[in-house]
Amino acid sequence: MSTSDRDWDEGGPERLYVITGGRADSTEQADLDLVTLIVSREEPKAGIQPELAAILRVCRSPVSVAEISAHLTLPTSVISVLLADLLADGRVEARTPASSRPDIALIEAVIDGLQNL
Amino acid sequence: MVSRISDTVTEPRREDRLPSTASSAVKIVIVGGFGVGKTTFVRSVSEIRPLTTEETMTQAGAGIDDIAGVERKTVTTVAMDFGRITLNDELVLYLFGTPGQQRFWFLWNGLFEGALGAIVLVDTRRLEVSFDVIGRLEEAEVPFVIAVNSFPDATSYLTEEVRGALDLPDSVPIVVCDARERPSSRDVLLSLMRYLRTFVTTSEST
């Protein structure tokens, strides 16, 4: 099913544990949707954890959580934990998805956009 | 070495970047049986080459939800292809094509939550594989339309025959498409959106 030509990390859960500092609990994940847009507010500083630096570089323009996961080849739950850190000290900003109960204006905007394809 | 992150990270290509004004995103989920053309559909309308995201989830019934557990068997990885359409300077649409194992779709946190709706892609040669997912979408109250992917060697069904076979109410739109063709896939997305519009107009007028 996958069209990716790169292998996802096969290092197993141990590696993911190290990346997140052992935090996989949902309470330590930011409240983010797959399509929450993330934008960096600063460039990575020297000595920063490589995964956090990678996120800051990928998010120089707005990028969804799903795209960050794809670019870093890390599961979305791990990305969510890492983003919680970056959000907490303002190194990235999150632009929340449009409401799940769409109003007529949102629906019309999607229709207009599709018609221009 | 614990981390090889610098070897595996790709950055979005310049031409794939969203405008800096992009402020909100919506998503639509494409569901359907194995080999029915979900990824083909996503690829035909997406402005970027489809990407793959991944989630790890504990196997149901394992009774262990510690991702750090050294028993690797307790963790299942599910991958999903997705594409993107920039609708205007502020609004972006993401399309997620769900993987083969249907039981995982509804375990993926937030996949259907917040989704505008779903497109059930069906192959008339194997309509029966769609029963389960249609039932689950109905339970989860996710609005959906049926898109019949027209495979060349499939018997051409009338949409009303498909409706009967899938036991769907008259209100659910059924459209025929060719998932390889961008205009055709776009029209399926439009029929879902027009269907959603009827809900909003109905509820606002009552």
Image: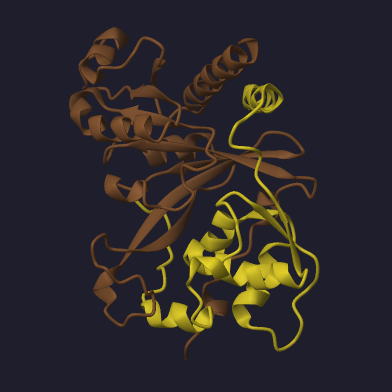
Chain colours: A yellow, B brown
Residue at position x 22%, y 21% in the image: B154
From this viewpoint, which residue is outermost toward the front? B206
Residue at position x 71%, y 67% in the image: A87
From this viewpoint, which residue is outermost toward the bottom? B1
Compared to B204, does B76 lie above or below? Answer: below
Where residue B25 sits, quadrant-wise, is top right
Q: Position of residue B53 (x, y in %)?
A: 47, 57
Q: Which sits in the foreground, B44 or B89? A: B89
Whether residue A11 is visible here, answered yes or no, is no
Residue at position x 46%, y 42% in the image: B112
- Residue A88 in the figure: left or right of residue B57: right
Q: Quadrant of the C terminus of chain B?
A: top right
Number of numbered discs overlaid on the protein picture: 0
Compared to B81, does A89 lie above or below? Answer: below
Q: Position of residue A44 (x, y in %)?
A: 74, 77
Compared to B76, does B26 lie above or below? Answer: above
Q: Which sits in the foreground, B120 or A115? A: B120
Where residue B204 sits, quadrant-wise, is top right
- Residue B4 in the figure: left or right of residue A57: left
Residue at position x 56%, y 66% in the image: A29
Q: Which sits in the foreground, B86 or B193? A: B193
Whether residue B145 is visible here, answered yes or no, is yes
Q: Position of residue B125 (x, y in %)?
A: 19, 25
